[in-house]
Structures are given as structure tokens and as C-alpha cells.
Image (cartoon, rainbow, N blue to C red):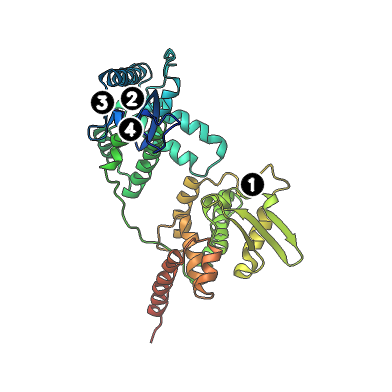
Amino acid sequence: MKSLFVDYSQRYNRKNQLNTNGEAVIQIRMYLNGQTRYYSTGIYIKPSEWNAKKNLPKDHTTLKKVNQLLLQLETYETDYRKEHKRFTLENFDDFGKPIKQATPINTSFSKFMTEQHQAEKVLNQPSWRVRELSIKFFRIYKPEVSFLEVNHSLIQGFEYFLRAKKLHTNTIAYHHKHIKKYILRAIKDDFIQQKANPYLIFKIGKQDTKSEFLTREEIERFENIKFNEKEIFEEKTRDMFLFGVYTGLRFMDIYRLKKSNFLEESDGLILDYQAGKTQKYGKKYLNILFDGKCNAIAHKYMPEDDSRTLFKGCTNPKVNKALKTLAKRARIAKALCFKDSRDTFGTQLILKASASVVQSEMQHSSLAQTQKYIHLSDEMKKQELSKIKW
């Protein structure tokens, strides 16, 4: 017998072992979502009393008792689903007991997403505020969404909404990635069925982007920008970007640096850090990298204690906006963003060190990630050669 959800069938002498009376028990096999559980009927019969071909007991009275138990199990499952809106094989542990009244559950995907996001705040993840913007956009697009409304049409509509804002394809992809994350959590918590995941059929578009990097000459022009006494933020932004050029650290890892991350040695500072993206630990010998220029920047902005970070106030949006202006002042015809500092570090380092050293310094998990900087360096050599007046 089969339910709409759990598959039920009868099994006899599953362990192929008879008791002292030459009998074995009849069991009910229950199968659901790749899991199997057996329930004993408490009825023992001899092998001669079992119809192996039909998988049934030969005796009608015994068959009636087994079928009655099957019906009770099916009824229990049905009633449990009506009350709790879900069911697992573990719920059979309470078979024979009154079904407990279900506690009210959240039926709102919008509320679920917001609660999940707020719970993540204590983790201090670099991408927390980015996900906050994705949720904000989603709630502007549609303020209230139930779990049942999470489908392909909803996600397709969100795509059109983001495109109407003239966002870059890769920015839209990031917003989809964050919403997809919360849908997968809702599936894990049984609020949404796996087959209802709209991202199984909706494909997130992504566009290859050209990596920008600075040549040695461009770095020097960036270093030589002059600031007046009122341009405190602009100077701090320039120095923060250069610190990334000199160390190869990601924006958030630099933004979170505190006094306790630095160890003072006789020949300079040693930076001890944990990468937010990979959670890997690393060290940077600041007196060695780029002739110790990052060492000077660290000293310049070093706070008195850990109550402040070195580059407090230099948020990613503000920094990226300021970098566009600073690039023009340095006569660099590139739309700089902070990520370009890391690309510049890798590109410059690959010219002077082996790929394995670059891989270690940039904390790449595979050498394939590092190969990109070899190609970038080929481009840089091409640029330099084109300037030669033969």
C-alpha cells in the first residue's frame, strides 16, 4: 500500500533469522525521501505461512491485522501533515500518541529572510551589508512574499526590477546570489520544497570583466599626488589603496586592521591577519614588500589602541568613488576600484617572484587562480614595450 508521500510495504523475516519457535516477525517498511524505517507489527508467523510471491501473509486474519496497522500508520501521517504541514519518518516515533498541536510557524519568506540576515550580524562578515542591500532591493520590488510565492516568476520579476535600475550584470548576479542563499536555507528548514527552488531553472547571468592594474609608472604617479590640509579623506583613501597595492590584501581585510594586528620588530612591522573571505591566517613582512612603503603607511595611521581601525571611515563605496577622482589627478586613464590594488600587487609580484610565491602571498587555493596574473603581466610588458621609441 502507498500513501501520497510515504511508501509503505510489508516485509517478512528481513534479517533471515527465525526464533526458537521457527517463526519470524512481519514488519512494515516505510520509505520517504531516501530514508527507510521499519515498524514491527508484533505478528510472528512461520515461513510456510508467508506468500513470498505476493509478499503477503497467506492467512486472511493475519493479513487483515497487518492491513489495519498500515491504515493506522497512513492515517497518522495524514493527520500529522494536516496539523504540522510537513512530515518525516522520525515523526513515527510518536505514533500511537495524540498528535500535538502545531506551534504557529512563519509563513512569510520576507520575514524569514530578514530574521536570518539579522541573526548573521553578530558574525561580522564582510558581505553582511552587501546582503542587506540585496534584501532592501527585494523588499522594494515586492514588500511581502510568502513561501508559496517563491517561484520562477517572482525571481524573473526581480531580475527585471534590477535591470530597470541600470545595474551592471555582475551586480545583479550578486543580488541574485544573496536571495538564492536565503531560499536554500528555507529549503533546508522545510519551508520550501527542493523542487520548488526557482534557481533550478533560472540561470543567473554573469559577464566577464577586464581586470585593471597599475604599471610601475602609474603607481609612482599615484604616490606623488599632492594634497592640501583639507583633503584628509582623499589622502587617506590614496594611502589605503597603496597599502593594498603593496600587500595584496582585500579591501575588508585592510578596513578591519587594528593595532593588535601589527608586531613591531627591529627591522619593521609584521602584519598578522586572518582573511575574511577565506578565513585563512597569514603574515606580511611590511619592511620587505615594496621597499617598506607599506610599513610607513601603517605607522602613519596606527591608532593608539584597538578602539579604532587604521582606516576608519573609509568605506568601500566612498573609497571607490574617491579613487575615480584620484586616478584623474594622477593622469591614469582607468576607472579604478579598490580591487585593482590587489590585481596590481599580483601583477607586479609575478615579474619578480615565482608563481608559487605569488600564490602563497595572495592566499590562492590553487595555482590556476594565480595564472591570471601571468597573463596580466604579459599585457603590462606589452604596454611598456609600446612606449619605447625604437
Q: Which of the pair 164/249 is nearer the observer?
A: 249
Amino acid type at image mark 4: Pro
- From where the camera sits, is residue 324 visible? yes
| Percent coordinates x, y for residue 307 in the rendering | 69, 42
Q: Which residue is mark 1?
A: 309
Give the residue furthest to the bottom: 390
Image point (30%, 41%), residue name: 199
Amino acid type at image mark 1: Thr
| Percent coordinates x, y for residue 156 in the rendering | 25, 37
Instruction: Name above or below for residue 32 compared with residue 228.
Output: above
Disc 3 crowd rating (10 Å Cα; few below 14, some 14-19, many 20+) is some
Instruction: Name above or below for residue 16 compared with residue 63.
Output: below
Q: CA distance from mark 3 to mark 4?
A: 10 Å
Q: CA distance from mark 3 to mark 2?
A: 51 Å
Q: Which residue is mark 2?
A: 146
| The image quarter in which residue 374 lies | bottom left
Q: CA distance from mark 1 to mark 2?
A: 41 Å
- From where the camera sits, is residue 8 visible? no
Helix or strand or loop: what does disc 3 sit on? loop
Helix or strand or loop: what does disc 4 sit on? helix
Q: Which residue is mark 3?
A: 58
